[in-house]
Amino acid sequence: MKIHEYQAKELFRKYDIPVPDGKVAFSRQDAINAAKELGQYPVVVKAQIHAGGRGKGGGVKLANSQEEAEKFSCEILGMNLVTHQTGPEGRKVKKILVEAGQKISKEFYLSLLVDRETSKIVIMASQEGGMDIEEVASKTPEKIIKVYVDPLCGIQAYHLREVAFKLDLPSSAIKQFMGMLKKLYVLFVENDCSLLEINPLILTSDDKVIALDAKVDIDSNSMFRHKDLIEYRDLDEEDPLEVEASKFNLNYINLDGNVGNIVNGAGLAMATMDIIKNAGAEPANFMDVGGGATAEMVENALKIILRDEKVKAILINIFGGILRCDVFAEGIVKAAEKTGINIPVVVRMKGTNLEKGKKILFESGLNLISAKNLKDAAAKVADAI
Ligand code: GDP
Ligand code: MN
C-alpha cells in the first residue's frame, strides 16, 4: 500500500524523526491558512500524489511571499501532474502539502528496503541525493552505499556508524543522524514497510539532518495488524477496477494489453499471461480468483474485466480443484446474465466436475469458444482480438 508524503511525515513525527513543519491542504483557502500559520517564508508547496519525480514535473514550488504561496497553491491544486512515474496520462492533484522552506546545504539519499536476495533489510544511502538519484544508480553505482541488516539481530551501532561515515557527514551531525537512522529502522519494522525512502535527506545550513521528502510503502498483506494505518489508504490514487476487485478479495492487477483473463491460482495466472504473450497477444490484466473461489467471486471477476474498455477478448483458464468446474460455470453464467457479454470468450477448463461445468456453460446459450488445451485457448483468443 502506498501512502502520501504528508502521511509518511506524520508517521515520522510519531517516531520523533525530524521533518519540516507543514500541513496538508485540500483547497486554496486551506493552503493560505497553512502558509500563514507557518509564519515564515519561503514556504514549499508540494503536490501530493502517489508518484515521485514531482519536482521535475512542476509539482514542487518554493514560494517567497504569501502571494506566491497562493499563486502556486492554485496552480498545483487540480493540475494534471505528469512525472516519469505517472505515465504520460499524468495524475490529477487533489491535495498539497504546504511546508516551511528549509535552507539546504547538502542533499543526501537514504532508503530502507527488504532485500529478497539476502533476506535482509538493506540501507541504501548516497551523497548524491536529490532529483537525479536514478541516474546516479545507473551510471555511478559505486556512489550508492549499501549496508545490510539481519532482521533477527536488528540494527546495531556499527551499522549506523558505517552509513554516517560513508556519507561523510560533519562531526556535529553524526550523532543526530545515527539516532534518526535507528528510529527509521524501528519505524520500518514496526509498520511492516516494504520501502522507506527519503530523497533528499538534507543537511541544513546549521548542520541539522531533516527528512525533506518521505516515501513509505506498507506491505498490503500486513494490513490486518495495522488498523491505524488503514485510514492512510487513498482510493482516489488507486486504479478503480483494482479497488473494486479488492472488495471481493480478488487478486487483480490492471495491465496494458487487450486480452482479459480469469484464472484460478497465481501460478496458473502467471503461466496464462506468458502463453497469451507467446501467442502474440498482450494480457490486459492479472486475475487470480483463488483456489477456493465461490461462484459469486467468479461473477464479480468477470464483471470487472467486462468493465475494462480496452479488453477485446477474454480467456478463461480454470483448473477445477477446490473450485469445482460447475461452481465456476455458474458464476460465469450469472455474470453474463447480469452484464451481457459482447466480446469473444474462450474457455479452457480441466479438473473436478468438468463435464457438469461444460454442460452449464454450453447449455446457457452464451456464445463461448471452447478450447482443447491451454495452447489452443491462447491461439484462439489471439485470433479473436
Ligand atoms: P520529488 O521530486 O517528488 O521527489 O519531490 P521532493 O520532495 O524531493 O522535492 C523536489 C526538490 O525540491 C528537492 O530535491 C529539493 O531540491 C527541492 N525542495 C523541496 N523542499 C525544499 C525546501 O524546503 N527548500 C529548498 N530550498 N528546496 C526544496
Ligand atoms: Mn524526492
Image (cartoon, rainbow, N blue to C red):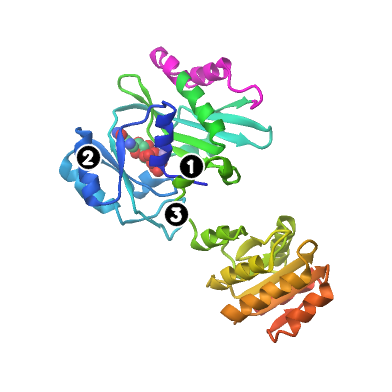
Residue 35 - label: 2
Q: Secondary structure at mark 2?
A: helix
The residue located at (59%, 75%) in the rendering is 312
The residue located at (30%, 40%) in the rendering is 23
Residue bounds of the magenta highlight: 150-178
Crowding at label 1, few (<14), some or many (≥20) Cα neighbours within 10 Å?
A: some
- The residue beneath circle 3 is 237
- Find the distance from the CA under tag 3 to the CA under tag 1: 16 Å
Residue 83: horizontal and vertical position, in percent? 41, 51
Q: Secondary structure at mark 3?
A: helix
The residue located at (51%, 30%) in the rendering is 187
Q: Is residue 384 visible?
A: yes
Q: Is residue 341 visible?
A: no
Q: Secondary structure at mark 1?
A: helix
- Find the distance from the CA under tag 1 to the CA under tag 2: 27 Å
Crowding at label 2, few (<14), some or many (≥20) Cα neighbours within 10 Å?
A: many
Q: Amino acid at mark 1?
A: Leu
In the depicted structure, whether residue 259 falls above or below residue 41? below
Quadrant holding the C terminus:
bottom right
Crowding at label 3, few (<14), some or many (≥20) Cα neighbours within 10 Å?
A: some
Would you say residue 156 sits in the magenta stretch?
yes
Would you say residue 121 sits in the magenta stretch?
no
Residue 229 - label: 1
The residue located at (62%, 59%) in the rendering is 250
Q: Amino acid at mark 3?
A: Glu
Decide which of tag 2 and tag 3 comes sooner along the chain.
2
In the depicted structure, whether residue 117 falls above or below residue 75? above
Q: Main secondary structure of the magenta part?
A: helix
Residue 167: horizontal and vertical position, in percent? 48, 22
Residue 373: horizontal and vertical position, in percent? 81, 71
Decide which of tag 3 and tag 1 comes sooner along the chain.
1
